[in-house]
Image (cartoon, grey):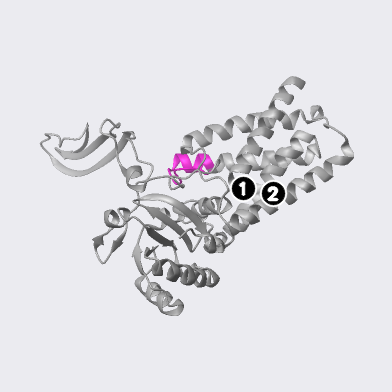
Amino acid sequence: MKILVTFSRIFVAALFLFSGFIKLNDPLGFSYKLQEYFGEGVLNLEFLIPYALLIAVFLVIFEVVLGITLILGYLPKFTVWSLLLMIVFFTFLTFYSAYFNKVTDCGCFGDALPLTPWESFTKDVILLILILILFFGRRYITPVGPIPTHKWIVFASFTACLGFAYYVLMHLPVFDFRAYKVGVNIEQGMQVPENAPKPEFAYHWKFEVNGEEQIVTTSGDYPKVEGKFISVDTETLKEGYEPPIHDFSIEKDGGDYTSEFLSQDNLIVIVAYNLSKSEAEGLNAMKGITDKAIAQGYEVIGLTASTTKDISEVKVKYDLNFEFYITDETALKTILRSNPGIVKLKKGTIVQKLHWNDAEKLSL
């Protein structure tokens, strides 16, 4: 039993530390995932959405601290109870999400290691078993190192996590695991290779034949059935290849300007997924840096998912001298964890990404 507890202790602690640090590197991204869970149709806890970022920061720091206390053997009863309660909740959540297909990626490891809903549930079941071993064998969780130093190690770890979270929120994630990281060519990221796997579907056709309901399954073609057609249900048998970038476009007044702007030599893009939520200080910073960029011959555009009314009001209020185009909100949140923020492109390749706090660092 002692060997089993030791193995579980090391494995669980390592996983919690890895998972916690990955999300701590991008707490804003984790908060977007929490908003999905809180939303209508999943947990129906919409009142928590405004507090998603605060909850995200607390959860990821708590996750890291639990990993540290488990390794140290500090407060073992509190640690294993906390681990058990957390994993029971998240096992339920991932099962619910997987079974009802509510959230396609749990966000357990951020963008570093995307998991399908059923993979997330399987991972949580394994963790639940290991944590139960720790729970019933907690008498074997012995302290490591001098006990008086444990509380100071935990305090220092908590403080370091809090400082790191503040830093990435005021700037950008230190490690970028997303499809829009520096060096990526957006057009190439949207391409589908010729030999890429194709999706496979099963179509369940429902007919009324001689007064009785009959279901015919095909791989695509309309079945030859002498009866009244009622409906058809589509079942995905196999997912096809999906390019890393699949929801990006630049549109305005019904026109698509994606290729035009991605072919520009020197393009500065101001990303603001929701202008009504953009910080005033950030928009003021955009005014100064974009005027400077335009004066030096750069093409400057804004990308947003905001309404025409919000765009007009912001342009007038902050005297912005560039046009805004429409892009999917999720894509904009993925491109940049800043609202607003700056992306510098050269022929569709991302050269630089900056939080509005770092606007003066833009290379012109």
Which circle's residue, 1 or 2, is located before the other in the chain? Answer: 1
Which residue lies under the disc numbered 2? Answer: 161
Q: Which of 149 and 358 is in front in this view?
A: 358
Q: Residue 22, can we see it?
A: yes
The answer to whether marks 1 and 2 mark residues whose Cβ atoms lie closer than 8 Å is yes
Q: Residue 1, can we see it?
A: no
Residue 322 sits above or below residue 146 on the image: below
**Residue 2 — which label?**
none
> How many numbered tags mark residues here?
2
Which residue lies under the disc numbered 1? Answer: 24
Apparent side of residue 313 relative to residue 131 in the rendered image (left or right): left
Q: Nearer the viewer, residue 127 or 155?
A: 155
Question: Which image quadrant is residue 194 in?
Answer: top left
Image coordinates of residue 15 in percent, x first then y, are 63, 34
Amino acid at the residue labelled 2: Cys
Residue at 20% in and 45% down: 230
Residue 270 belongs to magenta span: no
Residue 291 sits above or below residue 332 on the image: below
Apparent side of residue 144 relative to residue 340 in the rendered image (left or right): right
**What is the magenta range?**
94-107
Residue at 40% in and 75% down: 315
Classify mark 2: helix, strand or loop.
helix
Image coordinates of residue 129 in percent, x first then y, are 64, 29
Neighbours of disc 1 within 10 Å: few (<14), some (14-19), many (20+): many
Amino acid at the residue labelled 1: Leu
Residue 104 belongs to magenta span: yes
Question: Which image quadrant is residue 68 in?
Answer: top right
